[in-house]
Image: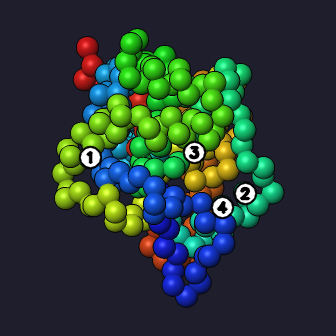
Amino acid sequence: MTHVQPSPETPITIDDPDVPKTRKAFVPLENNPEVMSSLVHKLGLSKALSFHDVFSINDPDLLAFVPRPASALLLVFPVSRSYETFRMQEDEKKAEYEGKGAEEPVLWYKQTIRNACGLIGLLHAVSNGNSRDFIEPGSDLEKLVKDAIPLGPIERADLLYNSQALERAHQSAADQGQSAAPSAEDNIDLHYVCFVKDEKNNLWEMDGRRKGPLNRGPLGPEEDVISEKALELGVRKFLQREEEAGGGELRFSLITLAPNLDFD
């Protein structure tokens, strides 16, 4: 995410995690499953997985349309004052994450590219859980993940920052959007958070603006990231906070990485 703009009457001026304007900027990705699928397929994720809209988490009939199992869930929302307040309070007592290596429960990426929160969310989705089993051998994505695993967060962020393959795939996907793409220098208020499940059945919240990955609690072996328990541990807690804050219209969207029904 590039530059969060909380409501003017209560500006937030401390502990700003946003990427400095002197850093490289990407054209923001459109919040569109086809665009997102195009990007990760170009990088090297098998077309057996693709992104899908989740139109409701409360209507069982609509939720039934989503292919399962769901490997990752992206929550996309405009950053609010209440969200920033919660983030700062939760992060205040946490040390900067230093995880690295094959024993790391999840592969977390710190965001250092402006307007790249969508890209970071997609990378969290395809780099973790059973999604990693669908990375094509010899692909740019395989190399990126393999190179990232032994690195600490700062070196890992530099790997993404300097990756020409990542920049090319991102630009190609950004050009495919149905709406007019904003400039790379624009301030975009949409943010992406990704929920993934690790090998030990823990639900993790992955956000490149935070101090590290956040373990939100255990799931059962058969529960995926849009199971009732996962939604209660993740997305619904976010929605509850926003509703209780009374910040006006609650705008958000959900996109999941799941089996591609058109794949033969």
Residue displayed at 32% across by 58% down: 184
**Cα separation between marks 2 and 4:** 6 Å
Left or right of 235 in this view: 94: right
Q: Badge 4, how many Cα within 10 Å: few under 14, some, many 20+?
A: some
Query: Spatial distance from mark 3 to mark 4, Cα to Cα?
Result: 15 Å
Q: Are marks 2 and 4 in contact (CB under 8 Å)?
A: yes
Point out residue 89 in the picture as x, y percentages from the top left corner. 73, 64
- Between disc 2 and disc 3, the foreground one is 3
Q: Is residue 5 left or right of residue 85?
A: left
Please indicate, yes or no, whether residue 191 appears anywhere in the rendered image: no
Q: Secondary structure at mark 1?
A: helix
- Rounded to the nearest angstrom, the CA distance separating label 2 from label 3 is 14 Å
Task: Kindly identify which numbered label has been placed on residue 91.
Answer: 2
For the residue carrying disc 2, how many other residues have a C-alpha within 10 Å: few (<14), some (14-19), or many (20+)? some
Which mark identifies residue 174?
Answer: 1
The C terminus sits in image quarter: top left
3D distance between C-alphas at marks 1 and 3: 21 Å
What amino acid is at disc 1?
Ala
Residue at 23% x, 57% y is 181
* Label 3 SS: loop
Question: Which type of secondary structure does the marked residue at label 2 adopt?
Answer: helix
The residue tagged with tag 4: helix, strand or loop?
helix
**Residue sitting farthest toward the top:** 137
For residue 182, say whether it is visible: yes
Residue at the extreme right of the image, as rendered: 93
Residue position marked by numbered label 3 in the rendering: 110
Residue at image x 46%, y 50%?
113
**Upstream in sequence: badge 2 or badge 3:** 2
Name the quadrant containing residue 206: top right
Q: Position of residue 190 (x, y in %)?
A: 42, 60
